[in-house]
Amino acid sequence: MKFYKNLHNTDLTPSKQQLLDAALILSILPHIFIVKPIMVLYIIASVVFLIFSKETKGRHLFIFGLFGGIALAFSFYETFTFVGLRKLSVFVSFVISLLFVAVVLQRLTKKINFYLLFSPALFLALSYFFYNTIMMLFYAITVIFCFLLLLLWHRMQSSFMAAFKMALSIFVFSIPSIVLLFLIFPRISFETKDFGFSASESIRTGHDGTMHIGSDALLVPSKRVVMEISFEKEIPNPQQLYLRGSVLYIDKTDRWAPLQEKLPDLSYKPKNNALAYKVTLYPHNKKWIYFLDHPLQAPQKANINNDYVVTSEKPVIKVMRYDGYSKLSNFIEEKTISETKEKYALKYNPIRDDELYEYMQTYDRTTGLMGLLKHFKNLNLSYSLKPSGIDLKDPIDSFIFGDKVGYCVHFASTFATMARMAGFPSRIVTGFKAEATNTYENYLVVKEEDAHAWVEVYLESKGWQRIETTSYAIKTQVQQNNQLQIKEEIQNPLLHKINLTYMYVRYTIQSWVLDYTRSKQMQLLKTLLEDIGAVLKLVAVFVVLIVFAYLLRQLSHQKKETHITYKTIKPVLKKLKKQGFIKEEHETMEEFLNKVYLKTDDETLLKIKNLYNQARYSDKKNLIDPFTNVVKLWLQ
C-alpha cells in the first residue's frame, strides 16, 4: 500500500534525465542478446561509471571512446568487409553497436540533445530486424506505451498514476487509427532477400531421408514444436493425422533408404473436396516439407513426386508458412507401379533374415494381407522407446527372436520385410503421427516426439495400403522418465490446456499480425473489391471502434471540464484573455500558462501552472486548497 500511495506523490516525479535513462534501458534490452559480449561489457562498464561517478572529465570521454572503438573492432573484425556488410543483418548489427558507443559518449556529457532523445525509438526500431516473435510484439507495444507514459509524466509534472491513466486513455483512443494504418500501410517483403528476421534454433525432426535401425534417428523425446497447423474446418479424426515425410524402398541392413533415381512429379490434382489447412513449419535444415496424408499440390519452390513426397529446392532454414490441400485416406490409388519400384519393393535378404524367412514358411498365402497381419501379431512383439538386444548386423531376427522389444522403426522394418517375403511389394514411410491431446479448436501442434514410421503395402491393380504396425504390439513398455511425464500430464490436464490455449493465441496473433504480408494485403483488397459482405463487415468493425473511442473521449473530456481545477482556473483564463492572451484549442494548460509566463515573468502565474498540474492529476484532495488560494491571490 505504501508503494501504491507513493505513485500518487507528485514530489517523486523523476527528472528529464532519469526518464530518458528509463527509456534507453527499455529500448536497449533486446539488443543485449544480439551484440557481442565485449559490447555488453562496454555497456555495463558505462552504466557502473555513470552510477558512481560525480563528474565526467575529458579524459573519461577519451577512455570510453577508445574502449568503444576497441569493442567495435573486436565485434566485427571477421565480418567487417564490403562483402560482409552487404548483408543487412551484419550492417544493422554494426549500426547498433556504433549507436551504443555514440549514446554512451553523449550520456557521459550529461547533456540532453535531440539525438539522445531520438535514440530510444531508433534502438526499438532496429530490434525488429532480429526479432519476429509474439514476445517481441508484446514487448514493443509495452515499450511504446512506456515511452508515452514517461513523456506525459514529464510534461504533466503529476503523479505516476495520473500520467498512467492519461497514457492509457490515449492508447485506447488510437486503436481505430492503428488498425486502419496496419491494414492499408504498404507492406515491405523480405522473402527473397538474404537478410531480415533471424530464425529460431533448428529443430530435430529425426528425418534425413533414411531410417536407421538401432539409432535414435526417429527417436527424439522432445516436446519442441516442429510445426503448427490450423484447419479451415474441424480437425480430422486422430487416426488420420499422418504427416508424410520420406518414402523408403531400399533395405541396407542398418538403415532404409529411398530410391536413387528421381521419381516423376505428381500431375496436378483438383483441390475439390480436399482438406484445407495452413502449416507453419519451423527450420530443420532439411528439404522435406510435411503434409497430411496425400498432398494435392506443393508450395512455391518445392516439388511433389508420385509417392506424395514434397521437397523444397533448398533446405528449410527459416520459418516456412504454406497452404495445404490433402486427401485423407489410408489408401493411395496407383493401378500400376514402375519396374524400379516393384523391384526394390519386393527385395529382401533371406540369408541375413534366415530365421524370419523360416518363420514365413508357415504363412498361408491364401489368407492375403489380413492373414499376414495376424501372422505378424503372433510374433508377440512389445513397444518400447528403449529397446535392447538389437544387432545392427542382423536387426530383424535379433528383434523378433531376441528380446522382442522395439519401437516404430523396428516394427516397420520387420513387417515390410515380411510383406516382401509374402509377395506383397512394400515400402516404409517416415514422418509424424500427431496426437489428439495436442489439439485446440481447429489448431494442431506437432512436436519432435511425434516422429513416426509406418508401412505401405501394394495391392495388385489397386494401390498402396497404409499399415500402422505399432498397433499390433501386445504391450507397451515406457521408460521411467517418460512414464512420470505421462502421469504428470494426466494429473495436470488444466496445465496442459492452459499451455495449448497460450500456443493457440500466439499462433493466431502470429498468423494475423506478424505474418500480414503484402500478398495477404492484396488478397484482402481483392476480397473487399469482390465481396460487398466483407466490406460491410470491415466498415462495421471500424464504426464500432470509432464509437467506442469517441465515447471514451467524451467521458474523459466531461470529467476534465467538471473537475474542480478547471472551474477554479476559468477566471484566470478570462482575465488573461482581456490582457490579450488567448488559449488555443490545441494548447495544453501547461503550454499556455508557460507561454504567458515567458512573456510576463509573473512568478505567481508559474506557481499556478505547477499547482494546477499537481491538483488536476493527483488524487490527493489536500492539493486543491493551495491551488485555489494561489489563484485567488493572483486574481486580486
Image (tube, helix red, strand yellow):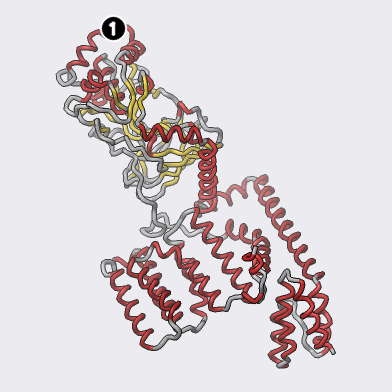
Figure check: 582 above or below 567: below
The answer, for residue 582, to whether it is visible in the render is: yes
Task: Name which residue type carries label 1.
Answer: Asp
The answer, for residue 265, to whether it is visible in the render is: no
- Pick the quarter of the image with the N terminus: bottom right
Q: Quadrant of residue 582?
A: bottom right
- Pick the quarter of the image with the C terminus: bottom right
Residue 83 coordinates in the image, percent (x, y): 28, 66
Figure check: 314 above or below 171: above
- Secondary structure state at the residue bearing disc 1: loop
Q: Residue at x 32, y 30 (%)?
A: 385
Q: Closest to the observer: 308 or 556?
A: 556
Q: Residue at x 33, y 8 (%)?
A: 367
- Say left or right for 611 vs 508: right
Figure check: 262 above or below 135: above
Residue 251 coordinates in the image, percent (x, y): 22, 27
Residue 113 coordinates in the image, percent (x, y): 51, 82
Q: Which residue is situated farthest in the left direction here?
A: 351
Figure check: 458 above or below 198: above
- Say left or right for 42 vs 611: left
- Say left or right for 605 vs 531: right
- How packed mark 1 is, by other alpha carbons closer than 10 Å (few <14, some 14-19, many 20 or more), is few
Q: Residue at x 52, y 61 (%)?
A: 140
Q: Closest to the observer: 312 or 25?
A: 25
Q: Quadrant of residue 28?
A: bottom left
Q: Please name the residue that numbered disc 1 is placed on.
A: 364
